[in-house]
Amino acid sequence: MTIEATRMMTTVLDPTAPPAAVYARLAPRPESLNGLRLGLLDNHKRNAAGVLDEIEKLISQRYELASVVRRYKTDVSRPCPEETVADLAAQADAVIIAIGD
C-alpha cells in the first residue's frame, strides 16, 4: 500500500489596519477647577457611570465648581457625535471622559 502526503498551504490574513496618525495637541490645563463648569462624558461602557460618579464626588470635595454637565455617548464603538462635542465645548470649561473598563 502506498500513502501519498499532500502538502497544503494555509494563508493567514491579518484583518487589522495600522493605526492612523493623529495630529493633536493637549488642551491647556486650568490652574484650578474652582468656579469652572465641569463636563463629564460617559462613553456608555458598563462602569463608566460609576467611575464618573466617583470622580464628580472627589472633585466636588476639592473644588467649588460652578456646575457639572453630563453627556452620554450612545454607542461605545463610534466616535462621539459632533453635536455632543459642541454641546460640551459650549457648556463646560473642562471635560473628563470615562472609559469604564
Image (spheres, rainbow, N blue to C red):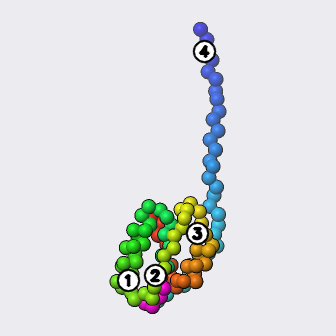
What secondary structure is found at the residue carrying circle 1? helix
Residue shown at the point (64%, 27%) measured from the top left: 7
Residue shown at the point (64%, 44%) measured from the top left: 13
- The residue carrying mark 3 is 80
Magenta-span inclusion, residue 26: no
Q: Is residue 96 rendered to the left or right of residue 50?
A: right
User: Residue 60 shows which numbered tag?
Assistant: 1
Residue shown at the point (62%, 74%) measured from the top left: 83
Of the residues tagged 4 and 1, which is closer to the observer? 1
Q: CB of mark 1 within 8 Å of CB of mark 3?
A: no
Residue shown at the point (47%, 88%) measured from the top left: 36
Question: Label 3 sits on what residue type?
Answer: Cys
Q: Residues within 10 Å of mark 4 (few under 14, many from 20)?
A: few
Query: Residue 10: horizontal and vertical position, in percent?
Result: 63, 35
Q: Which residues are magenta?
A: 32-38
Query: Residue 68: horizontal and vertical position, in percent?
Result: 46, 81
Of the residues tagged 1 and 2, which is closer to the observer? 2
User: Residue 68 shows which numbered tag?
Assistant: 2
What secondary structure is found at the residue carrying circle 3? loop
Query: Residue 76: horizontal and vertical position, in percent?
Result: 53, 62
Q: CA distance from mark 1 to mark 3?
A: 25 Å
Q: CA distance from mark 3 to mark 2?
A: 19 Å
Q: Earlier in the sequence, mark 1 or mark 2?
A: 1
Q: Residues within 10 Å of mark 1 (few under 14, many from 20)?
A: some
Q: CB of mark 1 within 8 Å of CB of mark 2?
A: yes
